[in-house]
Amino acid sequence: MGSIGRYMFRTTMGAFLIICISLTIVMWFTQAIREFDLITSQRQTVFVFIGITSLLIPLLVMMIAPISLVLAIAHILNKLSADSEIIVMNAAGVSPWRLASPFIASALVVSALVALIAAYLSPLSLRELRDWATEVRADILTNIVQPGRFATIGGNLTFHIADRRPNGLLLGIFLDDRRDPKEHATYLAEQGEIVKNNTGSFLVLEKGSVQRLEAGQRDPRIVTFDRYAFDLSKFTTGPQSVVYNVREKYIWELMWPPANDATYAAQAGEYRSELHDRFATPLYPLAFVILAYAFLGPPQTTRQSRTLALFGLVGVVSVLRLIGFLSVIVGVHYPHVIAAQYVALVGSIAAGSWQISRGQAIEPAAALSKFASAITERLARATAS
């Protein structure tokens, strides 16, 4: 790879990183916001919130990286074509494959990254996220402190709070305790908070009163307090056993599941589809890059519109990825359908390679070209007016 090739490789990878990071941040934000209430209920900091939800990033990158690479290469090829650099290099005798080699090298780098994520990083991060979520949801304190809702535990202990502040402070606390058949206790407090330490978990009530009614007595005893600690340790559950789904399995666990894996016995089809999806995922960057160069790489004059080629590329890439999704879903019950994904990928790579070897642009039908030209002219007139 000469100096021109290294320049094209650096430019492509730079554009890829910018697009991939931007799309990942947008997708991460839409996913992370779903866990915001769960984080605040545990009084975690913003840094903990970001750290926990960032465990979704490897999975997002694995899905977004091939598309980001296509967008980056389409941008670079359009730029090279607009500056007539492709035409100059073609006129100088540079072969199409030599021009395509920097993009293929970029595809191999992205494919290696996607393969690593699919085999190890994505399952690892999803496992960490599952472990954390299981631990949080197993804690009864997370479920009882829901504003405006009465929550009864064991049929004899009822909680209610009026509001919960972002810092974890609970307002308007009502607690009705009927666990002791000899005594009925009702707690009211202006505010309180959950405190966890080595000795257990406590609901610390502030500025309130407790009303105790003993069995056989007609009148209750009322005691006011400034601060009172109500023990909740017995209502928290210990470590929970976690069963990982197929998306959270490492690739070697999908290839060689343990003999005592009950999940595999019940979901053998899901294991098979997920395994083939992991195998096929690294092939998409390479297929997308070859298709991108086949549509946009051949030299064209600045008077020739590349709009149709760009739309053709988007259509072919979308159909190819759709075939992959459908083959994985349908392949759970019909194993032979999984082969459609490999046939589509190999066929796309072969057809794109043949088109690159021809060194000619893909020419649309004459009627389609006239239709596109008419639309472009109308849009130009509408913009000018």
Image: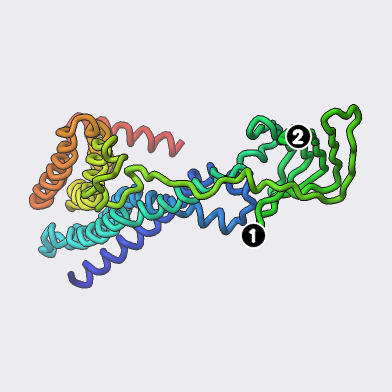
Q: Position of residue 370 (x, y in %)?
A: 23, 32
- 349 sits left or right of 275 in the view: left
Q: Amino acid at mark 1?
A: Asn
**Residue at the image position 28 percent from the left and 36 percent from the top:** 267
Q: Which residue is mark 2?
A: 176
Q: Nearer the viewer, residue 306 or 344?
A: 344
Determine whether 12 is above or below 291 in the image: below
The residue under the point 22% across, 35% down is 327
Q: Quadrant of residue 10?
A: bottom left
Badge 1: residue crowd in 10 Å (few <14, some 14–19, many ≥20): few
- Of residue 214 and residue 161, the one placed in the foreground of this image is 214
Q: Nearer the viewer, residue 331 or 341?
A: 331
- Residue at point 74% right, 44% down? 170
Q: Quadrant of residue 235?
A: top right
- Quarter of the figure that contains the N terminus: bottom left
Asked if residue 162 is positioned above or below residue 131 in the image, the reply reads above
Label 1 belongs to which residue? 198
| Residue neighbourhood size for the residue with mark 2, other residues' Cα within 10 Å, grouped as few (<14), some (14–19), many (≥20) | some
Whether residue 302 can be seen here: no
